[in-house]
Amino acid sequence: MTQKYILSFDCGTTAVKAVIINFEGQVICNAKAEYPLIQLHPGWAEQDPDQLWAAICETSKNAIIKANISPDQIIALVYAAPWKNIIPIDATGNVLRNSLIWMDARASAQAERLNQAAGFFVGTGQEYWPRLMWVKENEPEIWKKAEVIMGLNTYFKWKTTGQIATEPSDDFFHSSNPTLQATYNKIIKAAGLEEDLSKFPPMKPSTEEVGRTTIQAAKEMGLVQGIPVFGGFGDLPAITIGTGCCQENMVHIYFGTSSWLVDIIKNREDIEAPQYFTFNSQYEGAMFALQTGCFAFDWAVEQFYHTERNILGDGIFDFVNKDLASIPAGSDNLIATHWLNGELPPLSKNAKALFFNLTSNHDRRHMVHAVMESICYTHKRYLENYEKSVGKKLHSIRVVGGGAVSDLWMQMLADILQITVEVPQSPRYTGAMGTYYCAMVGLGYLENYDAIHDSVKIERTFKPRNENAAIYEKLYHIYLKLHPALYDLYCDINGVY
């Protein structure tokens, strides 16, 4: 009997992985392609949708070749992609401008007006609705021509099938939760978007078939016509499912380009979090997010190990981990901040990265080590906020993403959080595994996601070392004081946004 496979696309902020997975949940192979950020002004962040689609097609073809399988052995296709992209498409199918991605924070003036009009805090200039307002106000011709405004997951499905449908986590106009729908209605009215509702696509469940690969898409992707394409999700629920932490009150941390701590909840009233996302018709995710996670680590490696990176390629990360192994906890009292592109409250978008207490005794190893610690410090703050909200203390937490591959970083995280860190098998493929499970439910091979938690195998465990607790507790509290101490200076040099 011919083996069948699922083709899963895990799209991050700066790269996409096409992953071929068999029915036993084994990753057969993957192919990766990167795409650039376009940052025309401080606080702006765009991408060219055509470049992103080209990366999808490139990785699809390369994965098929690497797996040495026939395209007709692929029986399902599914996407996970970052949320809150704004891609306007005209009536003839032309993309009208670069996508404003989730990282874009240009709409501070619109956010201020929206918060006032709504009577409650909707968000900063990085939130979805203010950015829609910005396009409508500053690019009226584009807004008028836009027949539909898509998110990234919707765009990929449209390019693949010709059908237009969003999914629950990337829909900010419709909700099956009456309370959330009432909130959306208030925001839409306050934003002046009531007359534009027809521009936003209908929603289908993540596990529902949206359409099938067209002749054109099959040619571009190296596939065959007629493969079922399921709704998929944003990267947040995909990774949540891939960790197996997809039932109520389960928590995980993701170490990717951005980073976050997520708890699955029934109602938003259950926990106060900076952000939420729709998981499915029953549950939401309470999210404590870092705008800049491994992106800051990659930046530091590029700056301080540039020559070695050019020589070693992907081998640079093993090299850096070994080079940093002798640096003590606390980086000899050097503290870094990872806020290269600013951060969400209680930090701010106008805050930027720095090294605090740098001396001539420090070298590049200390600086990279301190950047890694800074991300852990922010997660410690979020974990404390989470534990305070729910009134309980965690004893262990699952961690996934590219950063979770590093034993050095995961031990550092365990030492700073002072709880056990569990890393599942193949932490880089967590998002792809989440989309795989989505397709398996859609195809009828799984009833739901309930059994996934126990099927996810823990590969590595890191126990907190008590001898590092005191130094990290001291530096953590200094780290917390940096933003309040510097906020006025950030406003002076960068303005308020």
Image (cartoon, rainbow, N blue to C red):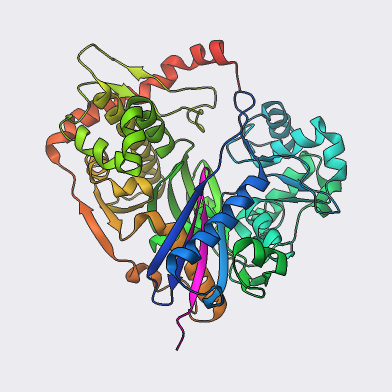
Image location of residue 79, percent across then percent down:
57, 60
Residue 7 located within the stretch drawn in magenta? yes
Judged left or right of residue 465, residue 371 is right
**Based on the displayed image, in which of its 4 quarters is residue 137 positioned?**
top right
User: Which is nearer the eye, 45 or 423?
Assistant: 45
Q: Is residue 426 above or below residue 447?
A: above
Residue at left 39%, top 59%?
A: 250
- Numbered range of the magenta stretch: 1-18
Q: Position of residue 85 (x, y in %)?
A: 65, 45
Q: Which sits in the foreground, 116 or 346? A: 346
Q: Percent position (x, y) of residue 488?
A: 51, 13
Name the dominant secondary structure of the magenta segment.
strand
Q: Image point 72% across, 43% down: which residue?
A: 187
Residue 145, x across and y down, in percent: 87, 44
Image quarter hosting the N terminus: bottom left
Q: Is residue 214 magenta?
A: no
88, above or below 363, in the image: below
Residue 344 relative to residue 106: left or right: left
- Residue 350 located left or right of residue 331: right
- Which residue is at 19% across, 31% downward? 329
Residue found at x 52% / y 77%: 73
- Outermost residue, left direction? 467
Of all residues, the one furthest to the bottom in this rendering is: 1
Report whether 471 appears left or right of 81: left
153 and 339: which one is in front?
153
